[in-house]
Each structure stands twice: as C-alpha cells, then as structure tokens.
Image (cartoon, coloured by chain):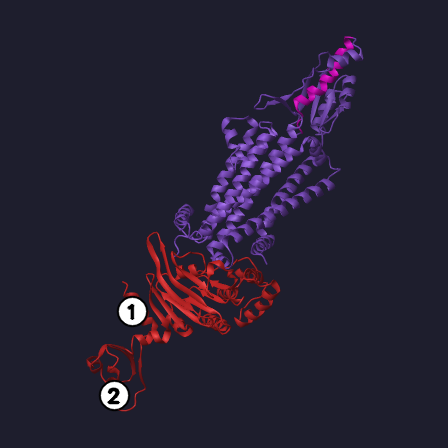
Amino acid sequence: MLELQGLTKTFGGQTAVHNETFSVAPGTIMGLIGQNGAGKTTTFRMILNFLHPDNGAVLWNGRPIANQDRAFIGYLPEERGLYPKMKVADQIVFFAQLHGLSRANALSRLDEWMDRFQVKGKKTDKVKDLSKGNQQKIQLIATLIHMPKLLILDEPFSGLDPVNAGLLEDGIRLLKENGSAIIFSSHDMSNVEEVSDHLVMLRNGETVLNGKVSEIRHQFGRTKVYLEQPPLSDAELEAFPGVAKVLQQGTRYTLTLSDPAAGRALFEAATAKGYLPEFSQQPPTLDEIFKLKAGASA
Amino acid sequence: MNTVKIVFNQVFRKNLKSGTWWSIVLSPLVLGLIMFGIGYYVSSTTAPAEVGVVAAQPIQQGLSKQSSDSVKYRTYGSQAAAEKALRDKKIDGVLTVNAQTPYTSRYISRQGGQDVSKNTLTADLSQLNTAAVAGELHLTGAQLTKLLTPPTVTTRSVTFSDSGKMSTKGGADEGAKYFLAMAISVLFYGFLLSYGSMTAQEIATEKGSRIEEMILAAISARAQFIGKILGIMALMVVQIILYGIATGIALLVGRNNQTIRGIVSQVDWSMLDGSFLAVTLGFFIVGILSYTVLSALLGSLVASQEQAGQASMPVVMLSLIGYLASLMSANGSTPLMSIMSYIPFLSPMMMPSRLAVGQVSSGEAVIALAISTAFLIVFTWLAAKLYETNVLAYSDNSIWHALRQSWTIARSERGRGKAVPANTK
C-alpha cells in the first residue's frame, strides 16, 4: 500500500505541491491528472525519493519509503531513452539486476515479455537498430520485467500508437492482477477512464479531484444528453426548458443541461413520436471535467 | 547482487564491447607501429653515401678504413676517373685531398645524390691529419695518445634542505628520469583526455536520455557514481595491462633489432630508483582519478547529450595548463611553478617532471601527492553529493546555470535528508 500523507513541496518560495494526500492499494490503478506544472512529476519524484517533501510523508506498507530498499519499484520516466548501442538483452538484464533479478531469470522472463509485446527484433539486436515502436516496447519491458510491487508511469501513453497503447494497457492490467499498486499520469482522459480505478487531479499543486472515476463523474450530475435523429427541431431543442447548450454533428446532438432533472421531460418529448435510435443521459466525460477544472484556475 | 557491482559490471562490459574504447586503446599502438615501420623502412633502404677519394695512397687507405654505415669511401686514381664515376651516378661526391699538412681538401657533390655533411668529412680527415703531423714531428705513440686525450670535467648537482644540509643529486640518471617523466606526462594527458571525455559522455548520455531516472528509481546516486568511476578505472587498468603486454611482445620480437636495442640501451634503467617510480605511479593514479571524478561531475550537469562537449571543456583547459607546465619544468624553476606544482589537478603532471630534473626533493613530491590524495577524497565525497542533485537538474542555458541551480537548492534543502534538484517541472 502506497500512502501519501499531506505532502507539501516548495521550490524557492513557489509551491509545487500542497497538502497532497491519497493512497494506492495493491491491485489498484491510480490515475494522476493535471496540466503541465500541476505537480505530477514532483509528486512522482517525492515517491521515488529523488525529492524530500517539506511536510508530510510517503509511506510504503506503513514505513517511510526513504528508508527502504527500492528494488520493488518500477518507474517509467516521461521522456524516454535507452542505451542506443547496447544489445536488447544486455539492457534488460542491467535494469533487471538493479531490481534484484538474476541474469538467468531476467533472460528467461525477457522471452515471455518479448512475445507478450510482440517485439519485432532479436535479443541480440542493438536498440538503435529497432523501430521506434519496438524501442518503446523494450523500455516498457525494462520497467515491468521485475514485476514491481509499486509501478510509477509518467505519461506512459504519450507517443504510443494505438496498438502499443493497447499492449501497455494489457501490461498494466497484468501487474494489477499480480497485486501491484500502480500510479500513472496522463493527459489523455480516455486512457485514464479505461484503465484507472481511482483518480487524483492536481491544479497548481492543489488536489482538486480525488476518488473513484465513476464517482467523480457522477458528482457532476447527468448533465449531458446524446440524441440521434430527434423529432424536435434545432429551435425547439434550444428553447427546451433546462437545456443550456446544443451542439449538432450531422444527425447527432449533444445537449448540455443546466439541470439534470430536465432529462426526463426531454426524453418524453423526444420519444413522443415513437422510435428514437439514441437517447443517452450521462455525467460529463473526464475530458470535460478536466477542462472545467483546469479552466477554473485560469 | 551489490548495486555498485552491477553498475561497475555494466560500465566495464558495455565499454569493453564498444568500438570507442578499442579505438582509444589501439590508436596509439597503431600509430606507434606505423612510425616504427616508417623509420625501419627509411633506415633499411638508405644506402651509405659513396664518396670517391682522389689523394695520395696513405690518405685513400686511411679514409677507406673509416667507411661507416653513412659514408663509404672509394678510391680513384685520377680526378677524371672520379668525375666520370660521378657523372655516371656511381658515387655521390668526389673528395680531393692535398697531402701537404695541414691537409686541404675540396669536395664536389652531385645534386640529387646523398648528402654528406662537411663535419663528417672534416672529422674523418682530421684523424689522418693528426697522425700525419705526429709522424712529421716524430712523436711516439704514447706522446700522441697523451696529446689526443681531452681534459675531463666531472659534474655534481646538489640540493639544499631547509636546514641547509647539502645533498648530492645523481647526475647520470636524470636523463632517464626526465625521459620517463615526459613519457608519463604524454601518457597521462592522453589518458585523462580519453577517459575524461568518455566519462562525461557516459553520464551525459544517461542523463540526456533520462535513463538516469530509471536507474535512480532503484539504487542510490552514490552507488551509481562510485560504480561508474570504478568501472572506468578498471577499463584504464586493462588498457595499461594491454600496453604492457604490447611492449613486452615488441621487446621480445625486436630484441635482435638494431633500432629497438638502440633505444633500450640509451636509457640507463638501473638508475630509476624505487621512490621515483612509486611517487610517479601514485601521481598517475591520483591524477587520473581526480580528472575522472571532475568529468563525471561536469557530465552530470548537462541537459542533453549535445551539451557533453561543453562539459568536457574545463577538463581540457585545466589539464592543458598542467601539461604545458610540466613540459616547461625542464627550463627551470620559478615561484609560480613551485606553487602550481602543489595544486591538485596540476601537481600530478608537474611534480614527476620536476622531480625528474631535480627541482624538488622526493619529500616535497610526497607532500604534493598527499595534498592531491586528500583533495581527491574530499572532492569525490563532494562530487557524489552534488551528483545526486545534478542528475535531476536540467538547464538548457548552460552547465554553469545548471550548477548554480543545483547548488542553491541543495543548500536550501539541507537538513531534509538529502539535497534536492532544481527545476523539477
């Protein structure tokens, strides 16, 4: 169990993170979101013991993480790199050994991971001779091969194509099933929504959201209605009581409600003439919540 | 496995497999082999210059006996015959000697032929001239020997200790020592430049590509720093061993070769005393380590691999000062030189040279070595501490900006367990 208890960190009078508190249980995934400069990387660096908080503590299984052997951690930095001239196997063995694996064990696990991630290339290839996508896979393997108990991924999806992003999601889920506590940051809310159990949003170092993904969305109420081919005209929709905004894309409409209760009357009016291909009343998406919350700081 | 050992193994093996390291090792050997080959080729294809002698028979015989590897004298009965041979390019010059003492002579050389220096001809003739004059004066062999024996001058170089006690410096061994000190200076300079830039490059690559952060997530910066320095030291030891083996093979193969025997016999190896060798070796090890640590420290300040050159610049400048000063030490001692030779980074290059030419005593060299060693210990400790913050501080401006950032925040963070990087995003 990873626990952050009231972390505060300042740099030269500027607060990077203020009173940050959350926990990540084994077998769960935490998404850390926020704009650039919100304090995500500082949070990771405090967890990794690169930085020490001014106040508060980072605990792993109830003990300060600073006092522990950190071989159980897996970390993928935001900007990526490997030793270009080293062979794939040599790099992976090096990182695995740093995390306490033997050479033989690392090499046998490497075969499994290369299969799992469908790496096109041999263990004896130099990293620079692999394609960018395959290099990304090798870096992920370097982070995951020792099956870390605590996995920290800084913007893991950035720069990945959809296929590699899918493989990464599979890898993250594998570690989750294995009981790892996982924390990752992302700009892409669809990844966060698909993968995370919990979510923390930072804004200028302050925690503005903290909870389960579905709970957070429902906090904002079902203020979005998606309609397809409604029997109402644009003018009728715009004039409908409780409708704040209408957005049309082809035959599809996205309505923003000022009051979620207006949805019932809208449904009745939309279905008054019978069949309707789509009527869906939902809370705002994470993306919308993100923009809403991030915008509030501006 | 111990984390220092893992890093050590990685640095050692990675470089042992790299072309860069092998080029550092092999290029001086290849260069040496080429130079030796050229020298050998030139000396083996150069035939002695042929000089035709037109003179009285005793002079012709005398000169013929003095033929050497560089000049061969041939005798001709007449000036015309000699000049014909010259025209036919059979000889390189014609020497006509008048038998009247003191001898006068004339030398005609053919353009394009091999040169014979005037000094060589004068020296060869003067022996005959002396013998002829001695004959005319009816001197005995003993008288002639006495006449020809030059006066002797024996030299003794002394130093004075602080208490005014005079001690004799060996004169004969200084050549050998100076030769060795110069050779070590060149070797030292070459090593520190190669390994300095290798170290800076190594760390700059890791930092620039953020591999550093993956490594430091698992192990401490200090363990990584020490493992890296030790790994690079081990590579250097391997290189020195390889050079030792190469020298051994060269001596073994070439033990019957004139050129190599000439070089070896010129140096009086027995004169190199143990204390000189020990101090020089000590300076070599401490010096290279100091520069390697400095390079590592500077390498850890770069934000990208492109800045690696910027990082190795101070190393180049500092070592150049020491190197040039060590070369100048032969020209005499100045107060500035005396001060400089106690300064860490400079003393490892200057002291062995000054010790070799007898400007300083072994005691003074040991004091300088002790200063350098003490400095190295403190410097390494400090560098490892700064390294922890440097590797996480990125500045696109310059490495000096990064150093200031790193230092300021490291100080403001004192007391929180460890120093903290600037600019953490």
Give the mark nearer the N terminus: 1 vs 2. Answer: 2
Query: Dot 2: few (<14), some (14–19), or many (≥20) neighbours within 10 Å?
Result: few
The quadrant of the image that shows the C terminus of chain B is: bottom left
Residues at marks 1 and 2 on the same chain: yes
In the rendered structure, which segment of residues is drawn in magenta?
B114-137
The chain assigned the colour red in the figure is A
**A181 relative to B304, above or below:** below
Give the image location of residue A52, x and y in percent: 42, 56
Q: Say which colour chain B has.
A: purple
Q: Residue pushed farthest front? A: A62
From the image, give the main secondary structure of the stretch colored magenta: helix
Q: CA distance from mark 1 to mark 2?
A: 30 Å
Count of numbered labels shown in the rendering: 2
| Label 1 residue SS | helix
Left or right: B289 in relation to A216: right
Q: Which residue is mark 1?
A: A292
Q: Amino acid at mark 2?
A: Glu
In terms of depth relative to the viewer, which is nearer, B4 or B140?
B4
| Label 2 residue SS | helix
Q: Residue at x 58, y 68 (%)?
A: A109
Mark drawn on residue B415: none
Left or right: A149 in relation to B105: left
Residue A51, magenta (yes or no): no
Give the image location of residue B231, x and y in percent: 58, 50
Q: Amino acid at mark 1?
A: Leu
In terms of depth relative to the viewer, which is nearer, A261 or A186?
A261
Residue B124, magenta (yes or no): yes
The quadrant of the image that shows the N terminus of chain B is: bottom right
Give the image location of residue B393, x and y in percent: 42, 52
Q: Which residue is mark 2?
A: A268
Q: Chain of mark 1?
A: A
Q: Quadrant of residue A14?
A: bottom left
